Image (spheres, grey):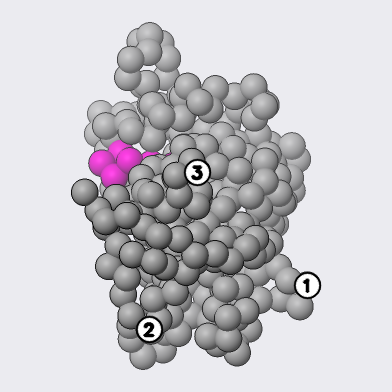
Amino acid sequence: MHIRFTKMQGAGNDFVVLDETQGRLGLTPAQYRFLADRHFGVGADQILTVRPSPAAGVDFEYVIHNADGGEVEQCGNGARCFARYVRDKGLTGKDAIRVQTLAGVIEPRLAADGRVTVDMGRPVFAPERVPFDASDLVPVPQGSGQKWPLALEGQAQEATVLVAVVSMGNPHAVQLVDDVDTAPVARTGPLVEGHARFPQRVNAGFLQIVSRSEVRLRVYERGAGETLACGSGACAAVAAGIRLGLLDARVDVHTRGGLLTIAWSGSPEDSVFMTGPATTVFEGQIDIPDAP
């Protein structure tokens, strides 16, 4: 199969974007994995697909596949690239678009300076809705939030980390660290991601507080490993930090790929807003082998 694609990145989180507005490509999980492969395919953290509006009041459908070929609910950096793509390709003339995802409808908005702001929806902290199995665990209260003890399987019995769990339409477990540069992301990230208490697996965030308005963040993403940036992870980390009483309502998040700005009032009735870059890297064509 011969297809056209666009390579994009948002704060270093990179994507292959596919246009299915004129018809489905019908790709299999193996073919998504091929596209994401950095040696044999194009190379990407996620594959983003643009589809026509599925319902009245919605402009497009936004479909996300991780590098492992699995479909996921949300990708914040991808949402910004999605908005930039449909505008640059002339698929819409709007500055603000409504986009259907598995997690619900989001509304990216393009600014005059080229950055994109996305209404990422309300954060959810109820463990059963993340989802997170909190049975038999005693949370540690802090601020208006709480941290949960998570024993890491395969480690010594005393190897327990405290995580704040939150859903931004996809599950996140955020732990506070003194320094993200020395945090054991490669070792601890997979243990948290695949922990049995997260039935849908989880994105593992490592959050360093610099000040009440500035943080540093690394994320070991579900199905992708550590990426240079994770938009929904930045939203989850800031929302968790605000609930724990550590952060103000507007926070600059320094990732290894660039700067994201996250804003949330702290009210459970209000959405989290994320602002950051979205850049086209190149256009291309590729032959995808038939799935085995």
The residue tagged 1 is: 113
Q: How far apart are the alpha carbons under marks 2 and 1? A: 30 Å
* Mark found first going from the N terminus, 2 or 3: 2
Query: Is residue 256 depicted above or below 47 in this figure?
Result: above
> Which disc number belongs to residue 80?
none
Left or right of residue 285, residue 90 in this image: right
Q: In which quarter of the image is residue 274?
A: bottom right
Q: What residue type is labelled 1?
A: Asp
As drawn, the residue found furthest toward the left would be 292
* Label 3 SS: loop
Discs 2/1, front: 2
Q: Does the magenta stretch mainly form a helix, a strand or a loop?
A: loop
The foreground one among 97 and 237 is 97
Magenta segment boundaries in residue numbering: 198-203
- Where in the figure is residue 260, as x and y percent of width and height? 68, 54
Q: Which residue is painted at 33% across and 41% down in the image?
A: 201
Q: In which quarter of the image is residue 94?
A: bottom right
Q: Which amino acid does label 3 sit on?
A: Arg
* Label 2 SS: loop
- Where in the figure is residue 111, as x and y percent of width and height? 71, 76
- Where in the figure is residue 220, as x and y percent of width and height? 49, 37
* Mark found first going from the N terminus, 3 or 1: 3
Q: How far apart are the alpha carbons under marks 3 and 1? A: 31 Å
The residue tagged 2 is: 22
> Which disc number belongs to residue 38?
3
As drawn, the residue found furthest toward the right would be 113
- Where in the figure is residue 286, as x and y percent of width and height? 45, 61
Q: Which residue is painted at 67% across and 27% down in the image?
A: 181
